[in-house]
Image (cartoon, grey):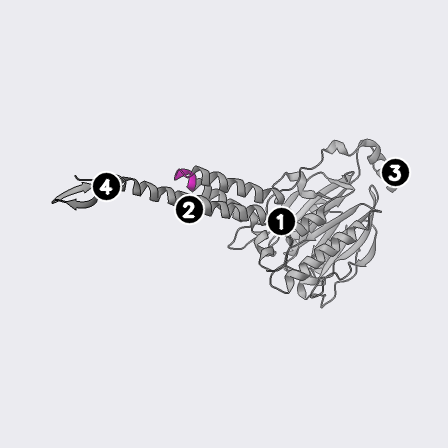
Amino acid sequence: MPGLPVAAVEGGGMVADPQGADRPQARRRRGRTAVLLACAVLAGGLAVLPHPAITVPWVVVPLQSLVPVLCLVAVALAMVMAVARQRWAALVLVAGAVAGLVPALVPMAPPAASVAPDDAAGAGASGGAGSPQAPAELTLLSLNAEYAGVDPAALASVIRENGVDVLVLVEADEKLLDGLQARGALDGLPHRTAAIPEEPQGGKAGGAVILSAHPLRSEGVLPRFAGYRHFDQPVAVVQDPGLGAVRVVGIHPVPPIGPDFVPSWDQTLRGLAGWQAERSDLPLVLAGDFNASGAHPQFRTLAEGFIPAAAAAGPWPGATWPVGSWVPPFTQIDHVLLRGLVPQDYRRLTLPGTDHRGILTTVTAGGI
């Protein structure tokens, strides 16, 4: 009979194999099971990836940077699975993507009401300005200038138009500062940390500076936490007339690429976490290029007890790197972390000449 598999020939006739009709269905079941298992392995990897704080093998750290991208790929693959009626596989992929993405999300900012009028008045009294009606504010701009290649005219315009009180630059040099000065951008930022050496620690990417509209006291640079290579990270106490004394640090660990740099990156973030924990005497701002995102457990440990300025923009404020590349920005490695201060707004700025977005934020007294 047509359509039935032949099992044997008996007496010159064909005998149908009733079980043969089930073989294609069995193969389909095995295929669906294999797809489900593969998706489960991928989802499990995504869920686990943001959690191990390891540096061997070193590729784990760069892979953690890609967590948002990998999660988006998993969601896209889940849509394909759903169309192919592989619903369990799709659900498993979505669950893995959510579990992987949650650690990288930014917590919501405290409401503005958390800055109590009494606190605002006290902050104003300590600095000679401010009032419950108009809490003291400080506007901060943080930027990785990419080997001092940022367009000084564009940066000068941003500084002037936004009334920047504190400017944190990493990968900067004195030539860039001269260009800003020639355009009048530093007239309102006359106070600064030490001059950037012609040959900074760690090479051309190691130059960093903090500039302020208000008097500052330099506290040098952070200790050298890394055993292999490090960049100088300046520390200064800014005497804001409304907020009082605020400690500001320009953050810039080495990038976590390669078997030598990854341990130095790890040591710097761990060392910085211990350093900041011992300095609770003043409000603290950590600003710069951390070369780390919320998908890195080392960064999350460091950020405990801080309010990210990005919290003012919601749980996914957007990526900050790389800009101007054939690869679209996919990770948020530039941060402003606040302790004793609350972000009132958060903006990412795209400036020509650098592959990092700058961060502009206004902060007031309050917070953790």
In front: label 4 or label 2 = 4
Q: Amino acid at mark 2?
A: Ala
In front: label 1 or label 4 = 4
Q: CA distance from mark 3 to mark 1?
A: 44 Å
Q: Residue furthest left?
A: 12
Where does residue 170 sit, x and y in percent of width and height?
69, 57
SS class, disc 1: loop
Q: Amino acid at mark 4?
A: Asp
Q: Amino acid at mark 1?
A: His
In the picture of the structure, the residue carrying the numbered disc 4 is 17
Point out the tag, 1 or 2, that comes first from the N-terminus.
2
Whether label 1 touches label 4, CB < 8 Å: no
Where does residue 261 sit, x and y in percent of width and height?
64, 63
In the picture of the structure, the residue carrying the numbered disc 1 is 51
In the picture of the structure, the residue carrying the numbered disc 2 is 34
Q: Quadrant of residue 220?
A: bottom right
Residues in magenta? 81-86
